[in-house]
Image (cartoon, rainbow, N blue to C red):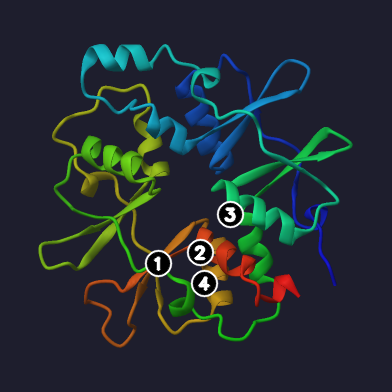
Amino acid sequence: MTKFVKDLMHNGLITCKPNATLGEVAVLLNKHRVHALVVADDDGQALGIISDFDLLAGEWLSSDSESLSTMRTLTAADLMSQPVDSVETGISLADAVKTLIDKDISRLLVTEKGKPVGVISLSDFVASVAGSQKAKRETVGDVMSDAILVCRGKTPLTVAARAMTSTGWRSVLVVDAKGITLGVISGKDLLQFVGRNIDPQKTVRDVMHPALTIDITASLREAADKMIQNHHHRLVVIDANDPDTFPLGIISSTDIVAEMARPDSVWQK
């Protein structure tokens, strides 16, 4: 049976004003545990989207005092992405997934007769996988990304932030000299430093969070369940029989959405 955007979307919008400072945006992102806000005017008209990655792209982690002063004057309107990509509530999930893949974006504004009524994001699609019947051949090893962005625990925060910005990755795996996983640093870990002078001695090891791991033979549904329960967009893939060796890859919400878009996926039948 065909499912539609209205069946999966998040009703309502979490918004900020165009003149919101980056610090205020960071507080809202952290408070609501979301990756992005809709920038809206006084009439509720969506003007753009600002995400945690947009904050990183603004290079607000600069340790240079003059640059930091400039960054503090920026607003949501300065860094938001526009125009806002949107879909109607009656669009099929398969078409929405194709839009996400084709445009390489993480979320869509949902409208009903042109009026914004909610948002549908990668996290919503992950949730749908967790609640669906397990499809054949859907294991972590089938869809994971083999490439991993890695840094050592002694890497300065600013260096990690620049690496994330230049590569388009939303997180970095932190390892020791032997390649054993110490943790993960993500955009959310860096939000606390918005608008602050960053100690050049502060390293990723000071603010990283524990890595969530999953066995390479686990089902895709198990991976989705773990992401949802822990509010994570990615898991470190390991061999459960030898967990202390270098990780085998990363599985993210993006990987799961890409699998849903495959012609032979249960979502395309």
Determine the image quadrant of residue 3: bottom right
Type of amino acid under label 2? Asp
Residue that mark 1 sits on: 145
Q: Are dots 2 and 4 in contact, CB under 8 Å? A: no
Type of amino acid under label 4? Ala
- Residue 223, disc: 4
Determine the image quadrant of residue 115: top right
Q: Earlier in the sequence, mark 1 or mark 2?
A: 1
Quarter of the image where the C terminus is located: bottom right
Q: Earlier in the sequence, mark 4 or mark 1?
A: 1
Q: CA distance from mark 4 to mark 1?
A: 13 Å
In the image, residue 41 lies at what x, y percent? 70, 17
Badge 4 element: helix
Q: CA distance from mark 2 to mark 4?
A: 11 Å
Residue that mark 2 sits on: 255
Q: Earlier in the sequence, mark 3 or mark 4?
A: 3
Determine the image quadrant of residue 108: top right
Q: Earlier in the sequence, mark 3 or mark 2?
A: 3
Q: CA distance from mark 1 to mark 2?
A: 7 Å
